[in-house]
Image: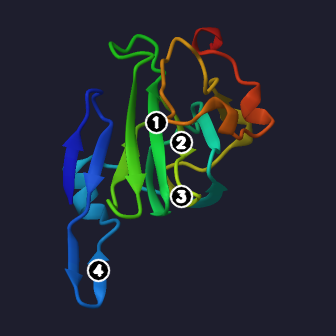
């Protein structure tokens, strides 16, 4: 796997080595030893999958300590714009974000460390999205930031009239309002 650093320390894009032939392709989607050597030493304990249609924005979500999570995300079908926002108080990149397009064609994965809010917008007709977490989901530690916080300046690459949100995602505070 090739690891591509981003402008924010710890947030990386991973491109797996793809082996193609007349039958199709093969790639190793995760290897603990390679991940430890090239990204960080973490142990994933929970895998999740969601299916969404065009226009859906999920996020910006995070887990507070002691259930903060490292996440490794990827698209199995379709395409998304995936976003990680630095919410670490005192960080030199606090409030900044990295956005990357993940598709079934590019097979890219995105690593989002603890201390980041995460979300994505669905750019294709539908998407199947998978992610690995290194801590279990704990509803009492759930946190979120408004997807449309003007201070974040995220271009979700989606017409506003096409955006579909859960009732919960319509009500999150701006980053400056989060403790």
Q: Which residue lies under the disc numbered 4?
A: 25
Quadrant into which the N terminus falls: bottom left
Marks 4 and 3, how far apart at CA? 19 Å
N-term-proximal mark, 4 vs 2: 4
In this view of the protein, which residue sits in the foreground, 168 or 112? Answer: 168
Q: Secondary structure at mark 3?
A: strand
- Decide: few, some or many residues near mark 3? Use Cα within 10 Å; few <14, some 14-19, many ≥20: many
- Decide: few, some or many residues near mark 1? Use Cα within 10 Å; few <14, some 14-19, many ≥20: many
Give x and y (percent) for residue 42: 37, 50
N-term-proximal mark, 4 vs 3: 4
Note whether 124 is above or below 114 in the view shown. Answer: below
Q: Which residue lies under the disc numbered 3?
A: 129
N-term-proximal mark, 1 vs 2: 1
Marks 3 and 2, how far apart at CA? 10 Å
Give x and y (percent) for residue 36: 26, 54
Q: Secondary structure at mark 2?
A: strand
Marks 4 and 2, how far apart at CA? 26 Å
Q: Tell me the tag on residue 120.
A: 2
Quadrant into which the C terminus falls: top right
Marks 4 and 1, how far apart at CA? 27 Å
- Decide: few, some or many residues near mark 4? Use Cα within 10 Å; few <14, some 14-19, many ≥20: few
Q: Which residue is found at the position 49% from the left and 61% from the top?
A: 78
Q: Secondary structure at mark 1?
A: strand
N-term-proximal mark, 1 vs 3: 1
Q: Secondary structure at mark 4?
A: strand
Q: Tell me the tag on residue 108.
A: none
Q: Which residue lies under the disc numbered 1?
A: 83
């Amino acid at each position: 796997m090739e690891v591509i650093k981003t402008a924010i320390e710890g947030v990386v894009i991973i491109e797996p080595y793809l082996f193609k032939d007349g039958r199709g392709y093969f790639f190793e989607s995760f290897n603990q030893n390679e991940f430890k050597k090239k990204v960080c030493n973490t142990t994933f304990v929970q895998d999740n999958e969601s299916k969404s249609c065009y226009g859906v924005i999920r996020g910006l979500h995070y887990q507070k300590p002691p259930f903060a999570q490292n996440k490794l995300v990827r698209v199995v079908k379709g395409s998304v714009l995936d976003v990680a926002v630095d919410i670490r108080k005192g960080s030199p990149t606090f409030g900044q974000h990295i956005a990357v397009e993940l598709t079934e064609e590019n097979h890219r994965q995105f690593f989002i460390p603890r201390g980041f809010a995460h979300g994505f917008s669905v750019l294709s007709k539908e998407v199947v999205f998978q992610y690995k977490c290194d801590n279990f989901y704990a509803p009492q530690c759930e946190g979120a930031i408004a997807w449309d916080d003007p201070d974040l300046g995220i271009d979700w690459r989606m017409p506003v009239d096409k955006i579909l949100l859960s009732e919960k995602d319509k009500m999150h505070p701006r980053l400056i309002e989060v403790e």
